[in-house]
Structures are given as C-alpha cells and as structure tokens.
Amino acid sequence: MNQELFQSFTTLAYRPFIDPINVHRLWYWLLIPLALGIAVTYKAVRVGDMSHYVRQVAAMTAQIVGAMFLLGLGSYLLIQHVLPLILPVK
Amino acid sequence: MLAALVVPGLGHVVAGEHIRGVLAGAGVLGLFFGGMFIGGIDVVDSREDAVWFYGQALVGPIALGVDWAHQNKFKVIDPVTKQVRSANPNEGRDPISGKAVAGGTPPNEKSLSKVNELGTLFGTVAGMLNLVVVLDAGFPSRDKPRKPKADAGATA
C-alpha cells in the first residue's frame, strides 16, 4: 500500500488536482475520507450544541463505514453462499 | 442565502455563525477538491459526465470555474473532427489555437476506472451537501438539546 502511494506522489509528471493519483488497487479505502467529509458537513448544519460536534462527526463516520462494511459483507454472503444454494450452478 | 450560493459556508458566516459556516465550507470544499485530488481535473466535466456535473455544479461558482478551465484550458480540439476532447497520452495542446499537437505532453492525464468514479462521486456528494448547507443558511433547523431525565419526569 505504502509503495503504491509513494509512487503515485513521486512520479515526475504528476501534478496534484490535475492528474489522478494511482490508488486503483486501494480504492475502497477512499470510503473513509468520503464518510468523514459527509459527516463534517452534515453535522456542521445539524448539531445544535457545537461542543458535541467532534463526537457526533466521529460517530456518524463510524456508522457510515460500518454500514457500508456490513452491506458489502451481506452482498458477498448472498452472492457467494446463499444464491448457489438456491440456484446451483450445473 | 445568496452568500451561501457564492461560497460554501459563507451564508452561515454572514449570519454570524462563524464556526458552523467554516466547518460546513471546509467539508464541502474538502470533498470537492478531495475528488479532484483523487481523480484529477478530469472528474469535473460538463460535456462527458453531464449528469454528475449537475450535482457538482451545486458547489457554486468554484465548480463552474473548474469546469470552464477544464473545457477551455485542458481539453484539445481534434484536428480532424474539430470536436473538443481530452488529449491522448502522446498529444500536447497548442496554447493559442487549442488544437491537439502530436508528440507533446497532454495538459492533464485522464483518470480511469474506480479512481475516476470515486473522484466524480466526491464532487457530486459535495454539491448535494452544499445544497443542504444553502437551505440551512436560509431556513435553519437544529437538533434540539435533549431534556434531562429528571425534567422529563417532572413535566409528565
């Protein structure tokens, strides 16, 4: 992981915000900054008492990442284990 | 609300809610530029990804400016078809005419696959969240503080 990230930043032709980074094999890790960005924005306009803001952002980020993980796990189990029982491949 | 349309979070800052505005703006702009960091400027493209751009455009003039720069400063004019397109890996861009020049360096590298999809998604989510921020600047709604249990029992 670190080597791929390192290579993506040290390529001579790479120009930040103009060229893409090379994270093709690590794309699923981008869920974490996506969830964090959503939580930071949504909780900024939703939380009444800003003293709870950081805790609420952390909780919402964890909820999004956890829910996506469970959805992925559920899809995997359905396709790899449940569907072959219902519709066996001949 | 007009200020919120110009810069994400500015509506709250103008209304006196400085911290809320800065945090909301940082979230929206962080997602938008985070998407560009992941997929490059290619993820903001009103010609090739029009439906996704409708969502990204909700970020405001910043998204429109990035798309203008992408269309007019990074894309090339095909010498045969005269159509505007991204430069191929072995092409450069003539800075005056904007036409594709064989043998140069492309103005930007086109992003592909999941990197392009996720970069585009970051920008569109940023735009949709900015719509929430703009609406909140005009019509604020907050979570009400929870009543302590003792008070709740006393009022029942």
Image (tube, coloured by chain):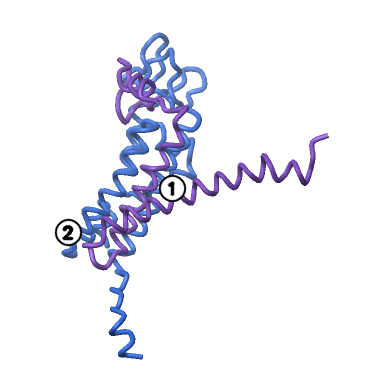
Chain colours: A purple, B blue
Q: Distance between the residues labelled 2 and 1?
A: 29 Å
| Residue reaching furthest to the top | B103
Q: Position of residue A65 (x, y in %)?
A: 43, 48
| Residue A8 position (above or below residue A63) | above
Q: Does dot 1 land on a helix, a strand or a loop?
A: helix
The verdict on a common chain for dots 2 and 1 is no
Residue shown at 36%/32% (left/top)?
B41
Nearest to the observer: residue B26 or residue B55: B26
| Residue reaching furthest to the right | A90
Residue B126 badge: none
Q: Position of residue A1 (x, y in %)?
A: 40, 25
Q: Name the residue under label 1.
A: A65
Where is residue A50, by image quadrant? bottom left
Amino acid type indicated by mark 2: His
Q: Does dot 2 land on a helix, a strand or a loop?
A: helix
Label 2 Cα neighbours within 10 Å, binned few <14 / some 14-19 / many ≥20: some
Marked residue chain, label 2: B
Q: Mark 2 points at which residue?
A: B18
Nearest to the observer: residue A35 or residue B90: A35
Q: In which quarter of the image is the C terminus of chain B?
A: bottom left
Marked residue chain, label 1: A
Where is residue B154, by image quadrant? bottom left
Q: How many marks?
A: 2
Q: In which quarter of the image is the N terminus of chain B?
A: bottom left
Q: Nearer the viewer, mark 2 or mark 1?
A: 1
Q: Where is residue A51 in the image (x, y as percent from the top left)?
A: 21, 62
Nearest to the observer: residue B90 or residue A39: A39
| Residue A70 position (above or below residue A21) | below
Amino acid type indicated by mark 1: Val
Is A73 left, or right, of B31 in this rendering? right
